[in-house]
Amino acid sequence: MSESNEGIRLSISRIGRRKAVTRLANRHSSRHDLRAKIPLFRFTARGKRWLVPKCRADSPEIFRKSRFVSVGSQGKDAVLRVLFVCTGNTCRSPMAEAVFRKLAAEKIGCREWELRDRGVDVFSAGVAAAENFPASREAIEAVKDYNLDLSQHLSQPVTVEMLEKCSLVLTMTSRHLDAVRRGCPARADRMFLLSKAGCDVSDPIGQGLPQYKDCIDEISDSIRIWVDELFQKELSEK
């Protein structure tokens, strides 16, 4: 693991998240290789669990939607690549990713799985995330109010390569922002707080479903502003 990647993790360790999460992140980080193939399944107590849904006739996507890839599904690099960052990549950033994908698809006039073919790539990661952890139960329930599904989400840690190749990095808190800017200072001008008002999005981990619903409402309000701004040019040209 590079010193820059290590810096991203260590600089956020004071956030106060449970120490167990940080230990897991450090344990798994040495295995994280963006060039490696994504595992298709893993064995659980109930048998084989597919990590990547089988392709359907209406969905040619073969990779998990939130997994970082260097090129689009047709071999073309994304024109707009957006990364959402939180701590563990199991609550706030996956919810933000899902909301952004839905709103962006509505703006462009396509289905969500077609975004990569349209040059838009959206994914999420965490500064202290372990790899392949599912979204929290409350996050999965909260996004259902927006007709979104996080049941296939698996966490991944932020890496320098992600930061280098993104057009826009949006973080949940100012500490996350400081961490990614220190991790990749050359791309600091592409990194911002999700909230245009400069407010942090509080971590709902360990709280109840009402707090998660408040969190996604707050996230959605901010993302609508970003989507309107990012896609204003495309809409005006139609």
Image: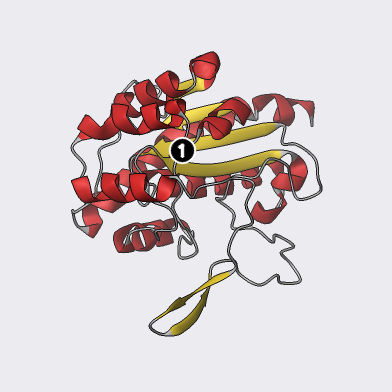
The x and y percentages for residue 24 are 31, 51
Q: Secondary structure at mark 1?
A: loop
Q: Which residue is mark 1?
A: 158
The x and y percentages for residue 68 are 59, 45
Give the total of numbered labels.
Answer: 1
Local crowd size for mark 1, using a 10 Å CA cut-off: few (<14), some (14–19), many (≥20):
many
The x and y percentages for residue 49 are 50, 76
Left or right, 34 with respect to 21, comes to right
The x and y percentages for residue 196 are 40, 22
Residue at horizontal 70%, vertical 24%? 233
Residue sitting at the far bottom: 46
Left or right, 65 with respect to 183, comes to right
Which colour scheme appears in the figure? secondary structure
Q: Quadrant of the C terminus?
A: top right
- Image position of 167 with respect to 19: above or below: above
Out of 138 and 6, give the one closest to the viewer.
6
Residue at horizontal 44%, vertical 49%? 94
**Quadrant of the rendered structure where residue 71 is?**
top right
Left or right, 224 with respect to 141, comes to right
Residue 147 visible from this viewpoint? yes
Out of 83 and 131, give the one closest to the viewer.
131
Residue at horizontal 62%, vertical 34%? 81
Left or right, 131 with respect to 167, comes to left
Out of 190 and 185, give the one closest to the viewer.
185
- Image position of 186 with respect to 68: above or below: above
- Inspect the image, locate mark 1, and give the three-letter code of the amino acid beneath it: Val
Residue 167 visible from this viewpoint? no
